[in-house]
Amino acid sequence: MDSKLMINYIDYFNNNRSRDPTMLVYDSFRGHLEKSVKTKFRDNNVDLAVIPGGLTSICQPLDVAINKPFKDRLHKEWHLWMANGGAGETTAGNLRRAKYSDVCNWVKRAWENISNETIINSFVSCGITDSLDSDHEELEISDIDDTL
């Protein structure tokens, strides 16, 4: 990803969100930090929080609480596919690769297995919250229009 792609992402993001003040949390990849990207975020009422290098395992919600259960579930999907003979063999005796549609379904089911509570708690445990007190029960995940 480079700054041009980030600018395109910001345009997409802005076309699909409310105009309320927003904060996005990114790692310190240089494409996220270029002046044009930071200016585009600021001009669109988006605060950019950057996790310093080497701290994503502590401060990045995906790394802290979401990636492991997601990957575990994805691995389980693959294992079930293999155990049920999904791979089969080529004429040369090699295992066939999974179809893209199968992999997409695995990813979808693995993500659906991550609860809203897990996602919210991952942000809270990283100190990323809009709550000014210690009561985080009011936090919720906004519904996203599936037609976007």
Image (cartoon, helix red, strand yellow):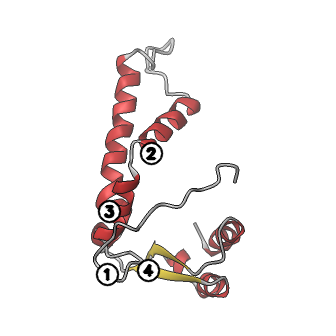
Please report the residue visible at 67 percent of the width from the left and 87 percent of the height from the top.
43
**Which one is earlier in the sequence, the residue at label 3 or at label 1?**
3
State left or right for residue 144 relative to residue 77.
right
| Viewer-nearest residue: 111 or 56 | 111
Residue indicated by mark 2: 111
Q: CA distance from mark 2 to mark 4?
A: 25 Å
Instruction: Say which mark, if any, is on residue 50.
Output: 4
State left or right for residue 20 relative to residue 50.
right
Q: CA distance from mark 2 to mark 3?
A: 16 Å
Local packing at callout 2 (Cα closer than 10 Å; few below 14, some 14-19, many 20+) is some
> For the residue marked with disc 2, what is the amino acid?
Trp
Q: CA distance from mark 4 to mark 3?
A: 20 Å
Please report the residue visible at 47 percent of the width from the left and 35 percent of the height from the top.
106
Please report the residue visible at 50 percent of the width from the left and 40 percent of the height from the top.
108
Cβ–Cβ below 8 Å for labels 2 and 3?
no
Up the image or down, 10 lies above or below 42; here it is above
| Viewer-nearest residue: 90 or 84 | 84
> For the residue marked with disc 4, what is the amino acid?
Val
Q: Nearer the viewer, mark 4 or mark 3?
A: 3
> For the residue marked with disc 3, what is the amino acid?
Asn
> For the residue marked with disc 1, what is the amino acid?
Asp
Local packing at callout 3 (Cα closer than 10 Å; few below 14, some 14-19, many 20+) is many
| Viewer-nearest residue: 96 or 42 | 42
Residue indicated by mark 3: 121
Residue indicated by mark 1: 133
If the image is split into quadrants, where does the N terminus sit?
Answer: bottom right
